[in-house]
Image (cartoon, rainbow, N blue to C red):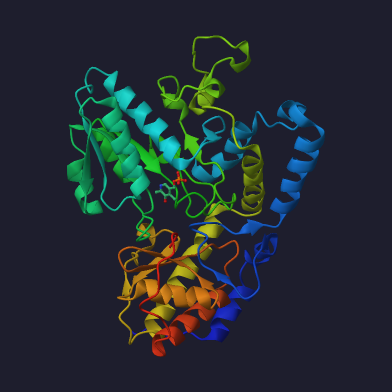
Amino acid sequence: MKATVISQHDCRARDLDDPLAPLRLRFDLPAGVIYLDGNSLGARPKAALERACQVITAEWGKDLIRSWNTAGWFDLPKRLGNRLAPLLGAQAGEVVITDTTSVNLFKALAAALQMQASDPARAARRIIVSERSNFPTDLYMAQGLSAWLDRGYQLRLVDSPDELAQAIDADCAVAMLTHVNYRTGYQHDMAAVSSHCHAQGALALWDLAHSAGAVPLDLNGAGADLAVGCTYKYLNGGPGSPAFIWVPEKHQARFRQPLSGWWGHAAPFAMDPGFAPADGIARALCGTQPVISLALVECGLDIFAQTSMEAIRRKSLALTDLFIALVEQRCASHPLGLVTPREHARRGSQVSFTHPHGYAVMQALIARGVIGDYREPAIMRFGFTPLYTSFADVWDAVEILRDILDTLAYDIAAKRDAVT
Ligand SMILES: *Cc1c(COP(=O)(O)O)cnc(C)c1O
């Protein structure tokens, strides 16, 4: 099949036709930068600056401690969780924004193992299934929790999504999976995997770090059991902004997590020496939150409220299709290998290509204003964020990549930075 040759003019025409194009104005992006790393750190909503000033000068500066009540600080994890819920296919009262993804995974996995352990028919299960290619912190947290519990829990890691069905068997307590793989952009079929888990008596815990705000989600419809994820990636919450945890209503009464701090207490200000978990999603909380950072998450959510995940997905697939097609047309003579699935249903909102000198090529791209990132082994990763990436950006990024590759304008001895 011969694809038609795409021109710069075609890309510009698509921008004129793009219903999401005006939303780019809600972000502050530096001139001369094509930002293809919103999957790692989302761009800054313009409103975040004013909101930060308001929290710091008025709420903290003038109202001081009264702001826990008057500015609604205390309710932020739940109120913002309710605003995020529709993007996840969750209901109000099922999501809180709090802590980090790593910490929320710890809480969720501990709770899931405890739910299984308290069911006599499932109490003997000791296997946690995940993927070797999962983001390392997920595997590290599972290793740390298993060692701490000292009950013989073991990670069973598969090397390919095709092996999951076999690995999730009658010994499996929990399948802990990342819905969209951070390196390859592979997207699991959440409903199919969750239903396989249930047929085997296992629970399905999903990490949505590369899914929330990137692809439409239907946690309740898919029958997932628990989920966590980041707000600083596609949700544009700001560097290190608090993460989220989803506990569906069906599991809330049985959900017990070990970080039983006072924010998860039924009556935090009763100052009772004994812990009693709050009813509902508040039991997923631990302690006092970074209010300034948490408050800014709302600026990203406000932008999502201007559109729908369906419109975002339509443009995301158009952007990633265009990027793949242009790289294949214009960089055809170079040793680039596509690792992201071509099949739409299996693709997140990023495109990854391998190149033998991937790190050096990515450094050269960044030096010329095309910001993606690099992940071992040899993977150049490009994230596409429909709220602020244009079709013309995709054209320009590929032209710069082509020029770097054609002229060998990269330094294969480039020194590694701490954060790649
Ligand atoms: C980005 C990411 C994380 C990050 O966890 P932090 O606790 O925020 O550092 C965790 N898991 C996955 C799958 C990720 O992609």
Q: Pick the residue in front: 209 or 413.
A: 413
Percent x, y of residue 139:
31, 43
Of the 4 image quadrants, the one containing the C terminus is bottom left
Q: Residue at x 49, y 13 (%)?
A: 276
Percent x, y of residue 404:
44, 84
In this view, the residue farthest toward the right is 62
Q: Is residue 412 left or right of residue 367?
A: left
Of the 4 image quadrants, the one containing the N terminus is bottom left
Q: Residue at x 46, y 78 (%)?
A: 364
Percent x, y of residue 348:
42, 58
Does the image show residue 280?
A: yes
Q: Pick the residue in front: 96 or 417.
A: 417
Quarter residue 225 falls in: top left
Q: Is residue 419 left or right of residue 110?
A: right
Quarter residue 272 falls in: top right
Is 274 above or below relative to 395? above
Q: Residue at x 25, y 52 (%)?
A: 161
Q: Residue at x 36, y 59 (%)?
A: 183
